[in-house]
Image (tube, grey):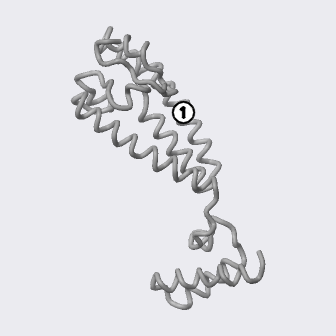
Amino acid sequence: MALGSKKKAMAKVKVIALSSGKPKKDVDNLKIICRKNPNPGTACGVLKPSNASDTGVAGAVLILAGVPVVVQSFVRFVVEGVGTPAPVAPTEHLVVGGLYRYVRNPIYIALAATIVGQALLLGRAVLFAWAGAFAVAVSSFVRWYEEPALSRRFGAEYEDYRRAVPAWWPRLRRRAARGAL
């Protein structure tokens, strides 16, 4: 980093620190931290908005995309299914509207995307491992518990839905209206 760029970066740190009400001593400490370790993710990196990387932006996009999917899907369970996604309080009706027209497991996909987004945003490899473990656990739960339970509960309606809508990779076209599978 050129000397002029470093001075500009330090000026940004001072402005941010002073505008946040930090005493001068804290500003001097931040300058020392930034000189010793100017990498993204450090105290200095968090304060400097110019440190945003492409992976961090991609991570933020995944998180911002995943959270509304989870919320919308939960709402769909309450409104359409008259219940919750939790096995202890299941729905009265099979949920096939909204995002469930395109993929059978939007909540799990969105949660996995959010974990991967956190890994990218925070630059933490351990979160990629957690995303992999989550994917294995969820796919096992779906295959060995959820699908058989839904098949027993909703019978032919679920089997038709299962044949028409993919479990994990959303398809681009909508599923036909309920009853017209």
Give the position of the C terminus as an image quadrant. Answer: top left
Q: Position of residue 101 (x, y in %)?
A: 38, 25
From the viewer's side, name the closer residue of 140 and 100.
Answer: 100
Q: Position of residue 38 (x, y in %)?
A: 69, 72
Q: Position of residue 163 (x, y in %)?
A: 43, 12
Residue 74, by quadrant, is: top left
Q: Residue furthest bottom?
A: 24
Residue at (63, 53) in percent of width and height = 55
From what the image shows, is residue 173 above or below residue 42?
above
From the viewer's side, name the closer residue of 110 and 2.
Answer: 2
Q: Residue furthest front?
A: 173
From the viewer's side, name the closer residue of 36 and 177.
Answer: 177
Residue at (56, 40) in percent of width and height = 131
Which residue was labeled with disc 1? 135
Numbered disc total: 1
Residue at (28, 32) in percent of width and height = 77
From what the image shows, is residue 79 above or below residue 24?
above
From the viewer's side, name the closer residue of 164 and 154.
Answer: 164
Residue at (41, 35) in percent of width and height = 107
Q: Secondary structure at mark 1?
A: helix
Q: Position of residue 39 (x, y in %)?
A: 69, 68
From what the image shows, is residue 7 above or below residue 163?
below
28 to the left or right of 101:
right
Q: Residue furthest right?
A: 2
Give the position of the N terminus as an image quadrant. Answer: bottom right
**Amino acid, disc 1:** Ala
User: Around disc 1, counting alpha carbons within 10 Å, would you say few (fewer than 14), some (14 to 19), or many (20 or more)?
Assistant: some
